[in-house]
Image (cartoon, helix red, strand yellow):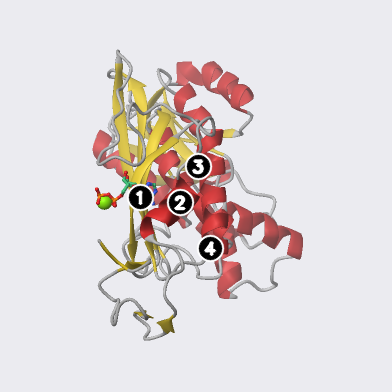
Amino acid sequence: MGTHGTHVCGRLCVSCPNVLVLESGAMMTPMSLGEFDLIERYFWRPAGVGPKRAIVGNGDDCAVIAPQSGMQLAVSTDTMVEGRHFLSTVDPVRLGHKALATNLSDLAACGAKPLAFTLALTLPRVEEAWLEAFAHGLLQLADEHDCELIGGDTTAGPLSIGITVMGEVPVGGALLRSGAKPGDEVWVSGYPGEARLALEAFRGTLHPSLPADAFDAVRLAMECPTPRVALGQGLRGIATSAIDISDGLLGDLGHILKRSGVGVALNLDALPVSPHLKPRSLELMQDCVLAGGDDYELLFTAAPDRRAQVQQLEQDVGLMLTCIGRIEAERGVRLFNQGQPGANRWASFDHFKGAA
Ligand code: ADP
Ligand code: MG
């Protein structure tokens, strides 16, 4: 990217250095901070602050990191675009948190321990208060997981946040989608469905609307999800397969079934139901739990003789784990309610259709 004068210059910048024209046509005054000042001020940590594990960190052409011997690198990327993945009004502290949380969730699903990440940030303008809040939310979660920001890219354009995260797993120890075996039990962590309930509240589709405290709670679940990092690492050697629920429980379970070449019998009456979903209609509750998304809970399979270990892990990480069904050799999804076969209203569920 080029810099003209003191401001970041993207391809939408005309008449440098005086005006930045946004896609909407709105004219902004010049960015007050140059690219490098901005990066240094908000994203580089002073010596002694935050984790330091890169041999060469932020500020060189490449960061250099070395996995420990006996470990493999697990790498994943997630991008969030304004208007598609978040609203322009979202609290920037929560946005910074969520941008990293969704990536840490992918590491968790593989059983990996977070090491480092890079940040590709596209900004329509430089708003220092926004940047400070965003960096705070991002780096606070990074420090919590001892995950170092080792580099990135900063450019002008419509707001988007791309993060690539790196973690480590013992050689051959990564949890994959492909290991589910007939007879395995299917487990899910926490209360999937709350993020979808929040989305419906924002859309104004809930009648009656949510009480204020419930709205705040589910909004927090949607805007500030907790990646299940400790659970993921604890599942190494216990789970036969795992995935994080970003697109909805049934859709993501479908990925495990497809990769593993198996089917499932799911017990609708066993689904964990958030206290905020309990008072709603059965239909809404099931839609949120089974076809909601953005939850970042973990869904995993484990042999029945691992049940005691799963329950011990539940205690160790302090997170509810619920057995919701069983893997079967026959492909497809079969739903049961109190032991009786039930209709699958979500048979045509496809997260590419009408995705929010
Ligand atoms: P180059 O042009 O050599 O790719 P850049 O000008 O894009 O380098 O970035 C300069 C340095 O700042 C690099 O070390 C890069 O990793 C780092 N950097 C750029 N943007 C960010 C960011 N948003 N967060 C953290 N580090 C960043
Ligand atoms: Mg660069």
Residue 181 tag number: none
Query: Would you name the residue on which mark 4 appears?
Result: 128
SS type, badge 3: loop
Quick check: marks 2 and 4 in contact, CB under 8 Å?
Answer: no
Foreground mark, 4 or 1, reads 4
Asked if the residue at tag 1 contacts the one at tag 2, i.e. Cβ–Cβ closer than 8 Å, the answer is: yes
Residue 82, image quadrant:
bottom left
Q: CA distance from mark 3 to mark 2?
A: 16 Å
Disc 2 on helix, strand or loop?
Answer: helix
Q: CA distance from mark 4 to mark 1?
A: 24 Å
Residue 209 appears left or right of 134: right
Q: Residues within 10 Å of mark 3 (few under 14, many from 20)?
A: many
Mark 1 secondary-structure assignment: strand
Query: Label 1 sits on what residue type?
Result: Asp
Task: Give the amino acid at mark 2.
Answer: Ala
Q: Which residue is mark 3?
A: 297
Pointer 1 residue = 78
Asked if residue 290 shows in the view, the reply is yes
Residue matched to label 2:
99
Q: Earlier in the sequence, mark 2 or mark 4?
A: 2
Pointer 3 or 4: first along the chain: 4
